Image: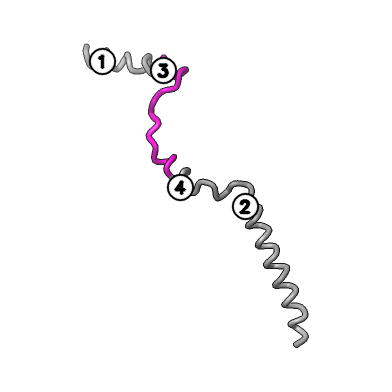
Amino acid sequence: MDILYLLVPLSVVLVLLIAGVLWYAVRSGQFDDLEGPGFKVLLDDDTPQAGEAGSAEQHAEPARRQVEG
């Protein structure tokens, strides 16, 4: 019976701690978009950026010469 004096307050503290962590996670936005990051991996983003367009064409030019020549 004496152990209940320890376990009941300990379990209440544990429940409050878990509720606090859950509340913090919800308030910080961790549960806003659960599917978006998974779809970002699958998106095909092979379009060159503005600075990379010239370098991609320069690398493709010698390959065209070899095929045509």
Q: Mark 1 falls on what kind of element?
A: helix
Residue at (78, 85) in percent of width and height:
2
Q: Mark 3 falls on what kind of element?
A: helix
Residue under circle 1?
A: 66
Label 2 or label 3, whichever comes before in sequence order = 2
Structural distance between the alpha carbons of marks 1 and 2: 57 Å
Structural distance between the alpha carbons of marks 2 and 3: 41 Å
Label 1 or label 4, whichever comes before in sequence order = 4
Q: Nearer the viewer, mark 1 or mark 4?
A: 4
C-beta proximity under 8 Å, tags 1 and 2? no
Residue at (45, 18) in percent of width and height:
50
Amino acid type of the residue tagged 4 in the rendering: Glu
Q: What is the span of residues highlighted in magenta in the rendered image?
A: 39-55
Position above or below: 43 against 6: above
Residue under circle 2?
A: 25
Amino acid type of the residue tagged 1 in the rendering: Gln
- Are there few (<14), some (14-19), or many (20+) residues within 10 Å of tag 3? few
